[in-house]
Image (spheres, rainbow, N blue to C red):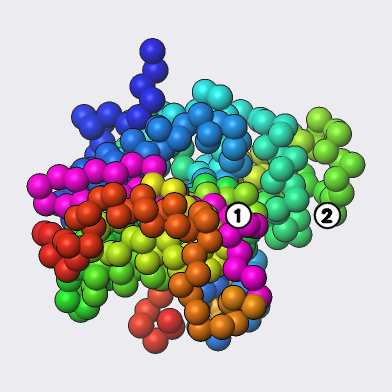
């Protein structure tokens, strides 16, 4: 699971109001090189919650992202490289996503998050 | 020449995962038929709900790969085995998608609101007893409850939430699902629709329908506030006549083709 996907996930348990971003428990992180695409990154920049990405990257051992970001930074190749690395190349292979409100754990097994709910959570 | 769709011999399998079938092929044929439009559309986020073997999402990624190398592909399925099988199918074809084991889009719906440019769904559409819907195992791959509509009717509002302003939905329907009624109810939400592929086999008659938001389709406030839902727009009429050309779509209603 890439951090782009992490950025799109929130706790889906009934009644939870502050289910985003999920806290990452990183048991195993993989780095897989991917081709950098400027247009794609520019496009995603506006869809991503920056703070959530910064914290997620940190919990995966990568702290090279600026704490805050603005669109003008997209002109910098150095910034794009870091953004790309955090968003597209870091994979959570094993671990869990934890709801910030309830502590409910969603396991991540072989890179696949399990967001299925129990009957009493729907 | 690179292959434009997934190859059956490279599609992974598991006894509890739906194997690519006529409906899967019809959906991929619809995407291929619409490929030129998809390339112009330049989607940045594409999504499949209920990816099963991964045949469809892999094919979509393959057919767009060369012209649009970086699309964010997401695929969900409630069946955990489907996740593994889809991963293997993607890998065997050298393409990639992010996989989430979930019920429809649960957990993704909020953050993906208004972001998805292309959504493809081959849902469980066979009319069955209600209690077969969503069970563990292979049954949930086809069991659609009353008129085969139970899962479809849960997916449509989700599609309306997550599709971007320019988003497209491709949906597989069976004649017994009453596709023209599906189109009418989507029209009330402001969607135009078109049958991209129509196919009948001995067992079933399938329509692959494409939906997109069209400002002209949105019913006026006045119309929407009255009970009268029968005043079809021009687009709606032409769609209904598309269906009525296939006279069997109504007569096979409730045949429960298993
Ligand atoms: C007809 S199969 C299609 C599989 C594959 N997309 C294809 O075309 O070959 C339907 C798939 O939807 C999945 N499914 C059924 N109900 C679902 C739900 N509520 N949420 C997510 N996936 C679901 C099933 O597990 C199955 O893999």
Magenta-drawn stretch contains B198 = yes
Q: Would you say the beta carbon of the disc 2 residue lies within 8 angstroms of ligand 1?
A: no
Callout 1: helix, strand or loop? loop
Image quadrant assignment for residue A55: bottom right
Q: Position of residue B94 (x, y in %)?
A: 41, 29
Q: Would you say the beta carbon of the disc 1 residue lies within 8 angstroms of ligand 1?
A: no
Q: Nearer the viewer, residue B133 or A79?
A: B133
Query: Are the residues under marks 2 and 1 on the same chain?
Result: no
Marks 2 and 1: which is nearer the front? 1
Q: Disc 2 and disc 1: Cα gap in Å?
A: 40 Å
Per the image, the residue denoted by label 2 is: A67
The chain that hosts pointer 2 is: A
Find residue B25 and name its label: none
Classify A109 as above or below B253. above
Label 1: few (<14), some or many (≥20) within 10 Å?
some
Q: Position of residue A16 (x, y in %)?
A: 58, 82
Residue at the (67%, 31%) spot, across then down: A37
Classify A81 as above or below B244. above
Q: Which stretch appears magenta?
A: B196-221
Quarter of the C terminus of chain A within the rendering: bottom left
The chain that hosts pointer 1 is: B
Examine the rendering and report whether any part of residue B23 can be seen: yes
Residue at the (23%, 57%) spot, across then down: B249
Examine the rendering and report whether any part of residue A9 can be seen: no
Residue at the (76%, 36%) spot, across then down: A80
Label 2: few (<14), some or many (≥20) within 10 Å?
few
Residue at the (25%, 50%) spot, across then down: B246
Q: Position of residue B237 (x, y in %)?
A: 45, 57
Per the image, the residue denoted by label 1 is: B214
């Amino acid at each position: 699971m890439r951090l782009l996907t992490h950025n799109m996930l929130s706790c889906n348990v009934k009644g939870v109001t502050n289910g985003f971003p999920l806290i990452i428990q990183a048991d195993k992180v993989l780095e897989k090189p991917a081709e950098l695409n400027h247009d794609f990154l520019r496009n995603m920049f506006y869809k991503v919650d920056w703070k959530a990405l910064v914290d997620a990257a940190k919990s995966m051992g990568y702290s090279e992202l600026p704490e805050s970001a603005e669109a003008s930074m997209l002109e910098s190749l150095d910034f794009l490289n870091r953004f790309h690395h955090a968003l597209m190349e870091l994979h959570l292979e094993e671990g869990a996503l934890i709801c910030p409100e309830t502590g409910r754990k969603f396991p991540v097994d072989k890179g696949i998050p399990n967001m299925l709910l129990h009957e009493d959570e729907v | 020449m690179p292959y434009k769709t997934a190859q059956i011999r490279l599609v992974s399998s598991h006894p509890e995962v739906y194997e690519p079938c006529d409906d899967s092929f019809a959906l991929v044929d619809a995407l291929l038929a619409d490929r030129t439009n998809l390339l112009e559309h330049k989607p940045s986020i594409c999504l499949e709900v209920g990816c099963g073997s991964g045949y469809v999402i892999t094919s979509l990624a393959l057919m767009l790969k060369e012209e649009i190398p970086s699309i964010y592909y997401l695929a969900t399925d409630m069946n955990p085995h489907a996740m593994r099988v889809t991963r293997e199918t993607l890998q065997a074809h050298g393409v990639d998608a992010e996989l989430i084991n979930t019920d429809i889009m649960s957990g993704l719906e909020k953050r993906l609101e208004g972001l998805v440019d292309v959504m493809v769904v081959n849902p469980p559409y066979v009319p069955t007893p209600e209690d077969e819907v969503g069970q563990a195992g292979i049954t949930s791959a086809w069991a659609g409850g009353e008129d085969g509509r139970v899962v479809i009717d849960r997916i449509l509002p989700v599609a309306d939430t997550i599709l971007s302003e320019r988003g497209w939905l491709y949906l597989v329907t069976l004649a017994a699902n009453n596709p023209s009624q599906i189109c009418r109810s989507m029209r009330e939400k402001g969607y135009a629709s078109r049958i991209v592929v129509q196919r009948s086999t001995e067992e079933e008659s399938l329509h692959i329908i494409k939906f997109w938001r069209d400002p002209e389709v949105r019913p006026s406030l006045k119309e929407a506030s009255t009970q009268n839902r029968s005043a079809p727009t021009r687009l709606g009429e032409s769609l209904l006549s598309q269906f009525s050309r296939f006279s069997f779509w109504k007569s096979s209603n409730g045949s429960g083709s298993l």
